[in-house]
Image: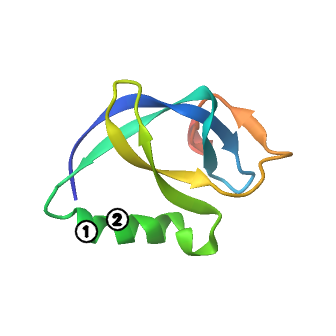
């Protein structure tokens, strides 16, 4: 589904969910580093439902939202819809094997 990727940042705050993956909250102060993945335009309608399943948006913990990267590119990202009180803010996500 992907044609390419590049590093970028978006406004928001990243948290350690405590479940082995990070969650992001957009629309708050801060900067989240990440990777912008360019999807094949002919396959976007197929790819997005699969990505939603991977992110498990059916549980309403995460919701796909549109964000704007630091360089002005519009992109989809997954926003944490639940309260983040008690979660640890982090600067970036590092896989367990890399810690």
Please name the residue shown 31% across and 44% down the image: 37
Corner quadrant of residue 12 = top right
Density class for disc 1 (Cα within 10 Å; few <14, some 14-19, many ≥20) is: few
For this view, does 61 lie left or right of residue 83? Answer: left
For this view, does 1 lie left or right of residue 25? Answer: left
For this view, does 3 lie left or right of residue 62? Answer: left
- Eyeballing the image, is 77 above or below 29? below
Residue named by callout 2: 48
The disc at residue 45 is 1
Considering the image in quadrants, where does the N terminus appear? bottom left
Q: Position of residue 92 (x, y in %)?
A: 59, 32
Please name the residue shown 64% across and 35% down the image: 13
Q: 54 or 77, which lies in front?
A: 77
Q: Secondary structure under badge 2?
A: helix
Distance, label 2 to label 1, CA atoms, is 6 Å
For this view, does 53 lie left or right of residue 39? Answer: right
Q: Position of residue 2 (x, y in %)?
A: 23, 52
Q: Position of residue 98 (x, y in %)?
A: 57, 36
Residue furthest bottom as drawn = 58
Considering the image in quadrants, where does the C terminus appear? top right
- Eyeballing the image, is 60 above or below 21? below
Please name the residue shown 45% across and 29% down the image: 9
Residue furthest left as drawn = 42
How many numbered circles are shown?
2
- Asked if the residue under mark 1 is in contact with the one under mark 2, i.e. CB atoms within 8 Å, the reply is yes
Please name the residue shown 86% across and 45% down the image: 86
């Amino acid at each position: 589904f992907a044609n390419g990727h590049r590093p970028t940042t978006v406004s928001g705050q990243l948290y350690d969910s405590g479940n082995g993956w990070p969650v992001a909250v957009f629309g708050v102060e801060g900067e989240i580093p990440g990777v912008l993945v360019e999807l094949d335009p002919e396959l976007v309608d197929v790819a997005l439902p699969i990505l939603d399943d991977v992110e498990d948006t059916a549980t309403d913990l995460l919701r796909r939202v549109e964000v704007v990267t630091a360089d002005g590119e519009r992109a989809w990202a997954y926003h944490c819809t639940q309260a983040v009180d008690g979660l640890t803010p982090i600067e970036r996500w590092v896989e367990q094997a890399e810690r």
